[in-house]
Amino acid sequence: MEDFSIIALYNQRDEKAIEETSLKYGAYLYSIANNILSDVQDSEECVNDTWMKAWNTIPPSRPRSLKLFLARITRNLSIDRYRNSHRLKRGRTVSATLDEISTFVPPRDIDDEIERKELAALLNTFLYSLPPRDSNIFVRRYFFVEEVSVIAEKYGLSESNVFKILSRTRVKLKKYLEKEGYSI
Amino acid sequence: MNEVDFLELMNEVDDGILERSERDVLDMKKKTSSVWLRVGALAACICIVAAVGFILMQWPESALTEMIGESETETVTTATFDTTATDDMVDDIEVNVSEGRGYGLSLVQIDKEAPSYNNPYYEREDAEPTRTVTLFGKTRTAKYVETSEWMGSDIKDEYKDALGNTYDFAEDGTFLSYVGSGDTADFRPALYYDKGIAPDINEDEAVALAEKVGREIFGEDFDKVKFESVEYNNFGEYHVQFYQRLGADGTLLGLTCDVTILADGRVYSLHMGNRAAFRELDESKYALVTKADVEAPAKALYGEDADGFLHEDIIEIRKMNGRFILYVMVETRGGGEDIFYEVTDLKSGK
C-alpha cells in the first residue's frame, strides 16, 4: 500500500493503518531497533511502541516521508530504552558505534534547546558539504547504526574502505565543530 | 554531550540526507538485480551474432567493411569500468624512473570517490555446484550460493555447508576464506568481554593458533606473509593480521591473511586476500614499486596542503571490474583524501 494511503487510514482513525504500516515497515524498523539494542524482545517492544506513537501522532503530524518519520520514532524509543537499561551488556553494533562517536563529540552538555538546534543545523550543513558517498556511509553508520560489513555490502566496497571513509569523516566533523566553537 | 546524545542528535538529520542514503542503496540493489536481464540478453545476442558471423564469413572483406563500417559493436562484459569524469581528472600521470624513485608506474587517475563494482553479486553459471572442503580435521560438502566481486581483489564464489558455515573460492578453485556459523553456534562473546571474564587464551596463543591454521590451510602462500598485528576487541575476539609487504620499500600490500579467534580458542574465520588476483601481476615489476611511485602524483594534486602520504604506510592494489586499481589514502590538512588510479603496466607479459 502506498504511503499516502496508509496516512489516510491514520487520518480516518482506521486501525487498518497499523496493520498496513507493520506489513510495510515492520522488518525495516525492527532492524533499526535491533542494531541499537541487540535484543529480540526489546526490539520488538520498541517497534510495537512505534505503532502506538504513530497512531497518537498522525494526525496532526503529516509526515512527508512515512518511512523516515517512523524510523525516527523507533530510533528515539530504542535509544531511550538503551539509556534506561541497567544491563552491562552492550549491543555488538552500537557498542562499536559509540566507541567511534566518543572520538569526536564535544564534551559539553547540550541542555539548551536552542543550542541543540544549532548543533543539529551544523551537523546538517556538514553532511550536505560532503561527497554524497561519504555522507551516505556516515548516515548508514550513525543514524541506521548498521554494521560496517553491511554498509560495505550495500555499497560494493571493502570493509577497510568503509572504515577509512568513516574515520576520515569523523576527523573532518571534529575539525568542523571545533571551528564552529564546539571544542573537543 | 556523550556518545548516546550524539546518536540521538542524529535524529535531526534532514530527510533529504536520509533519503539520499536510501536511494543510493536502492540503486546498488537495482544494479545487482539487472544482472539476470543482461545474462539473458547476452545469451540471445550470442546466438544471433554466431548466426550472422557464419553468414558474413562467406562474404568478401571489402563488402564486409562496406556493410559494417568503422564502428565497433558493443559487447556486454563485466570488465567495463564505470568512470565519472571530474574536473580533477588527469590523464596518464607518468613518474620517470630514476634511482630511488621506484618502478615508474603509469597511473591514470579514476576519481576521488571509491569506484563501485559493476556486478557485486550474481550467479555464475559455470561455477562448480558443490565443493568438498577439509578444514580443522573435518571434511564437508558445501553448495554454491552466489558469486561476489566486491570484497577485495578476488572474485569469490560463495559456498555454504549444511551447518551454515561459509567458504569462498576463487574462480579457479583457490580457497580464499571461511566464516564459521555452525561450528561456532554457541558463540557468545559478551559472556567473556562484557562480564569481564578473561579469555581462555592469551594474545601469544591466539597468534600461534592463527599461524598454525593459516599455514595448514593456505600452505606456501602463508609463508609469504608476516605477522602484522593482533587485537582483542570488545566482541570477545582476537583479530590477527598477517601482511605480505611488497615493493622495494615494503609499502605495497600483497597477500593479506586475517584470522579471527574466539575467546575460547575456536577459529571463527580466516581469509586470505589478493590470493588469486595477484597471480596476474608481474612479480619482477611490482618488486620495484615504492611509495615514491604514488607520492609524486599525490603531491601534484594536493601540493602544500598534504601533511603526509600513504595513510598507514600502505599502497593497495585491488582488482575491480577486470582492471587493477591502485588506492591511496592521502593525509591532508582537511582530514584525508582518497585517490584512485588505474594501474596498467604491472601485468605479466606487458
Image (tube, coloured by chain):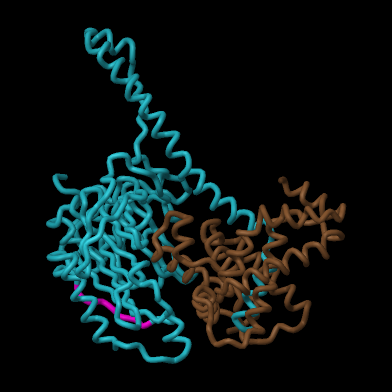
| Chain B drawn colour | cyan
Work out whether residue B236 can be spotted. Answer: yes
Magenta stretch: give its range: B226-232
Main secondary structure found in the magenta portion:
strand
- On whether residue B311 falls in the magenta region, the answer is no
**Residue A39 image point, x, y percent:** 57, 74
From the image, which quarter does the N terminus of chain B lie in? bottom right
Question: Looking at the image, which residue is at 42% across and 50% down?
Answer: B116
Considering every residue shown, the one lying at the far front of the view is B162
Q: For residue A57, what is the image quadrant?
A: bottom right
Q: Look at the picture and state if A17 lies above or below B44.
A: below
Q: For residue B67, what is the image quadrant?
A: top left
**Residue A66 image point, x, y percent:** 73, 55
| Chain A drawn colour | brown
**Residue B23 image point, x, y percent:** 59, 50
Left or right: where B64 falls relative to B303: left
Question: Looking at the image, which residue is at 71% across and 83% down?
Answer: A110
**Residue B258 image point, x, y percent:** 29, 70
Q: Look at the picture and state if A40 lies above or below B340.
A: below
Q: Look at the picture and state if B72 lies above or below B150.
A: above
Of residues A173 and B172, the one drawn nearer to the viewer in this rendering: B172
- On whether residue B228 falls in the magenta region, the answer is yes
Of residues A123 and B29, the one drawn nearer to the viewer in this rendering: B29
Left or right: where A40 falls relative to B325: right
Question: Looking at the image, which residue is at 28% across and 44% down?
Answer: B127
Question: Looking at the image, which residue is at 24% across and 8% down?
Answer: B59
Number of numbered tags placed on the structure image: 0
Left or right: where B325 falls relative to A170: left
